[in-house]
Image (cartoon, rainbow, N blue to C red):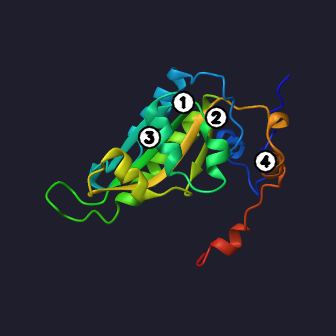
Amino acid sequence: MSHVLDRTAQTDVPILDVLAERWSTRVFDAEAPINEEALRAALEAARWSPSASNTQPWRFLLARRGAEAHTRIVGSLVGFNQGWAPAAGALLVVLAETTDDEGNARPWATYDAGQAAAFFTVEAHARSLATHTMGGFSPDELRTAFDIDERFTPVTVIAVGAFGDVDAADEAVRSRESAPRVRRPLAESLLLDA
């Protein structure tokens, strides 16, 4: 029987269950196919995230495990991420259109693409998909691997798939998975609370 950890956040005030229960696993079931219905719903949630002037400056590269594109995305990952991320059922690259097609800067695009990524992860979790958003990747390698237009900036790579068995993971991954979830106190994040 596979062992999936309960990593529910111990919040100072109650928040939505889907937010408190969402966490970034590094243990994916390398055999389970991606739940396509849940994946489409997560992408739809991302599509409906807010954006400045409704510009929707996000784009996605989606590659399922077994596809050559999945291998190329894994090749762009750095360090520890290359060890566990290949097991994910799919990898999603989130891009921000930081310059429009007329050459005008979109300074808010990265923020908006981040919101799309957040909406994706929350909806995925609500539909029992595991996710892990990564900053450990090479944007230049992604640009080269997929011939990404200069107006698009890779923001993050999200591993998504079925939760795996933590007991089957290697020691380094198990150690990170079982480490306490901590956040700085809210008061330390509020620079002003007038």
Label 2 SS: helix
In terms of depth relative to the viewer, which is nearer, 153 or 66? 66
**Horizontal relation, residue 117 to residue 146: left or right:** right
Query: Which badge, 4 or 3, is on the more N-terminal residue?
Result: 3
The answer to whether the residues at label 1 and label 2 have Cβ atoms under 8 Å apart is yes
The answer to whether the residues at label 1 and label 3 have Cβ atoms under 8 Å apart is no
The percent coordinates of residue 128 (x first, y second) are 65, 29
Which quadrant would the C terminus be assigned to in this image? bottom right
The residue wearing badge 4 is 177
Label number found at residue 87: 2
Crowd tier of the residue under label 2, counting other residues whose Cα lies within 10 Å: few below 14, some 14–19, many 20 or above: many
Q: Amino acid at mark 2?
A: Ala
Between tags 1 and 3, which lies in front? 1
Label 4 SS: helix
Crowd tier of the residue under label 1, counting other residues whose Cα lies within 10 Å: few below 14, some 14–19, many 20 or above: many
Query: Which badge, 2 or 4, is on the more N-terminal residue?
Result: 2
The Cα atoms of the two marked residues, 2 and 4, are separated by 15 Å
The Cα atoms of the two marked residues, 4 and 1, are separated by 22 Å
The answer to whether the residues at label 4 and label 1 have Cβ atoms under 8 Å apart is no
Q: Amino acid at mark 3?
A: Ala
In terms of depth relative to the viewer, which is nearer, 76 or 116? 76
Residue located at (51% from left, 38% from top): 91
Label 3 SS: helix
The residue wearing badge 3 is 46
The Cα atoms of the two marked residues, 1 and 2, are separated by 7 Å
The Cα atoms of the two marked residues, 1 and 3, are separated by 21 Å
Q: Amino acid at mark 4?
A: Glu
**Horizontal relation, residue 152 to residue 87: left or right:** left
Query: Which badge, 1 or 2, is on the more N-terminal residue?
Result: 1
